[in-house]
Image: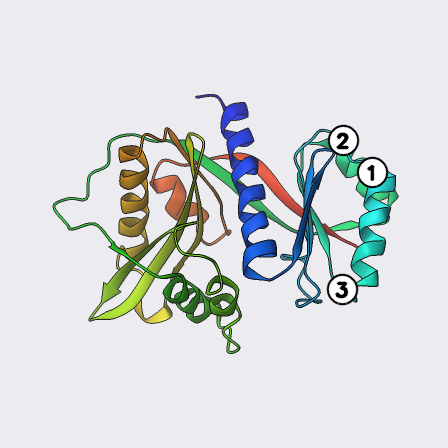
Amino acid sequence: MDDGTLRHRLWQGFAQLQTLLGGDAAGGVVVQEQGIVASFVPAAPDSPTLNAAIVLGDEFDLELLEAMRARWEQLGVRRWGVWVDGFKFRVTDTLRLARMRVTSASPGMATELAPQSLNGRAPALPADLSTVGHVNDLAYGNPDARLERTLSPLRPGLLHAYVEELRGRPASVALALHHGQDCGISFVATAPHARRQGLASHVMQTVALEAQQAGLTSATLQATNLGEKLYVALGYRKVSDMQLWERRR
């Protein structure tokens, strides 16, 4: 499968996840028009992750950007952002004209699904969204349980959740969004006490196994710099430079 197809699947899944997190979970409003998906979440005024536009097309109209900016500011949102593939130069040129800048960039990665081996181990267990959020908060040191609060309101069945336990405690987790022929993976995390024991690899293999059994042909994800080595070892390759652009008030 070529990188262009995998890149398209990556961004489609990313936009669908944004719709869930910015709409269903956070009680916000999601707008889809002119090749963008944007969420407006006044309950999270300092979150450019929830208050964000994802550009799916090859261009981004400056007037549309200004209209969205005005809407965020009317809602009292202090930080908002635009996600774009860094190689969409017409879009990035528009963002520069709007005096925005890149505040984070991460590799978008993908793989074609192939038969998985769990080396005789049982698959990772099904999990609830609260558990996935809790382990992510432990992994990222969030004392306010922000990710658990973000995921918990989502309706069951929208996402597939997985957990690997260590000594009876949730230790490593992931979420999967099945869309079209792709499995979009997110919220992969391992609690500090359980790292370097192969738990995340096992969870990822379980995610891929169940996706393949469901008839999907690829898996995509947004990696952290820390997680990129793990994904490369599992057969993923970089297909996109996922950039977040911001202009703060």
Residue 17 in the image: x percent, y percent?
53, 47
The label number, if any, that marks residue 77 in the structure image: 3
Give the residue displayed 82% in from the left and 44% down from the top: 65
Which residue lies at the image location 48% right of the left edge and 62% below the top edge?
151
Displayed quadrant of residue 218:
top left
Q: Which residue is mark 1?
A: 94
Expressed as whole percent of the image width and height from the top left, the position of residue 227 reads 44, 51
User: Could you give the CA–CA distance between mark 2 and mark 3, rounded to whole angstroms?
Assistant: 25 Å
Instruction: Find numbered disc 3 in the image and state the secondary structure of the residue it sits on.
Output: loop
The answer to whether marks 1 and 2 mark residues whose Cβ atoms lie closer than 8 Å is: yes
- Tell me the kind of residue under disc 2: Glu
Nearer to us of marks 2 and 3 is 3
Image quarter in which the N terminus is found? top left
Q: Is residue 195 visible?
A: no
Q: Earlier in the sequence, mark 2 or mark 3?
A: 2
Furthest residue in direction top, as rendered: 2
- The amino acid sitting under disc 3 is Val
**Residue 99 drawn above or below residue 153:** above
Gap in angstroms between the C-alphas marked 1 and 2: 8 Å
Q: Is residue 146 above or below residue 22?
A: below
Residue 163 visible from this viewpoint: yes
Comes first in the chain, label 1 or label 2 = 2
- Across and down, in percent, residue 193 comes to 32, 71
In which quadrant is the C terminus drawn? bottom right
Rounded to the nearest angstrom, the CA distance separating label 1 from label 3 is 22 Å
Residue placed at 21% from the left, 71% from the top?
168
Q: Residue furthest left?
A: 120
Q: Which residue is mark 2?
A: 59
Q: Nearer the viewer, mark 1 or mark 3?
A: 3
